[in-house]
Image (spheres, helix red, strand yellow):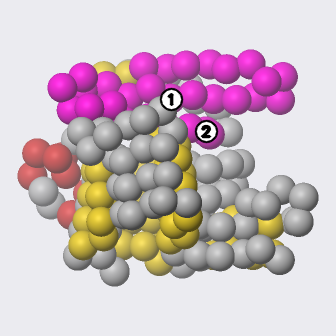
């Protein structure tokens, strides 16, 4: 049984596989934080992970509802932090990697966008943003993402400041 989640999903961390749980962080208008930790076995369909049938990826969606970055890696996650078999969509940026090097595999990252308004400097990395990060990205589809504004870079992927992602078998 899943708890009822607020519509403003902001952050998601997938911890190393040995832990087998997800922590969801939500920020509401009063700047309070709610944290949900769910068992992968109970919370999400893991059919892709057990069968490797890629048709399940389109059925396992993390939707940002245009309310912020959909997935956030920013606590020093390493390659044992794995995001696999999800569709990441409709965020104000899809996946945000800062000071981390997670593994992102068999994901569809689509229809995310960033907007720079000169004040916020946030017009980079519509699909994936990397800063001081070296994620391993493989077997992913990155499409239909955009970056708008004066300082708009990398609709699909933007990497800056000592980032060196390893990208293989992606379209």
Identify residue for label 2. Answer: 9
Q: Separation of disc 1 and disc 2 at Cα?
A: 8 Å
Q: Position of residue 99 (x, y in %)?
A: 48, 44
Q: Are marks 1 and 2 in contact (CB under 8 Å)?
A: yes
In this picture, residue 33 sits left or right of residue 128: right
Identified at 76% across, 28% down, the residue is: 28
Within 10 Å of disc 2 (Cα), the crowding (few <14, some 14-19, many 20+) is many
Q: Residues within 10 Å of mark 1 (few under 14, many from 20)?
A: some
Residue at image x 56%, y 38%? 11
Q: Is residue 10 left or right of residue 135?
A: right
In this view of the protein, can residue 104 be seen by the observer?
no
Say which element carries label 1. strand
Q: Earlier in the sequence, mark 1 or mark 2?
A: 2
Say what secondary structure mark 2 lies in.
Answer: strand
Q: Residue at x 62, y 19 (%)?
A: 34
Residue 25 visible in the current orientation: yes
Residue corresponding to mark 1:
24
Q: What segment is highlighted magenta in the picture?
A: 9-37
Our reading of the magenta stretch's main secondary structure is: strand
| x and y percentages locating residue 123 in the rendered image | 72, 67
Q: Is residue 101 above or below residue 130?
A: above
Q: Which mark is residue 87?
A: none
Q: Residue 2 or 9: which is nearer the viewer?
A: 9
Please tell me in which quadrant of the rendered image residue 140 appears: bottom left
Residue 22 sits inside the magenta stretch: yes
In the image, residue 80 sits, relative to residue 154, either above or below, namely above
């Amino acid at each position: 049984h899943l708890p009822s989640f607020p519509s403003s999903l902001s952050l998601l961390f997938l911890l190393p596989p040995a832990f087998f749980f997800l922590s969801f962080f939500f920020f509401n208008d009063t700047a309070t934080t709610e944290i949900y930790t769910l068992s992968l076995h109970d919370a999400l369909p893991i059919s892709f992970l057990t069968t490797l049938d890629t048709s399940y990826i389109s059925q396992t969606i993390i939707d940002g509802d245009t309310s912020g970055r959909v997935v956030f890696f920013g606590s020093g996650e390493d390659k044992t932090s794995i995001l696999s078999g999800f569709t990441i969509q409709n965020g104000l940026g899809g996946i945000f990697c800062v000071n981390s090097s997670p593994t992102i595999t068999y994901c569809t990252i689509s229809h995310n966008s960033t907007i720079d308004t000169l004040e916020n400097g946030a017009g980079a990395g519509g699909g994936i943003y990397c800063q001081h990060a070296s994620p391993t990205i493989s077997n992913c589809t990155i499409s239909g993402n955009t970056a708008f504004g004066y300082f708009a870079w990398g609709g699909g992927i933007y990497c800056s400041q000592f980032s060196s992602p390893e990208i293989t078998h992606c379209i």
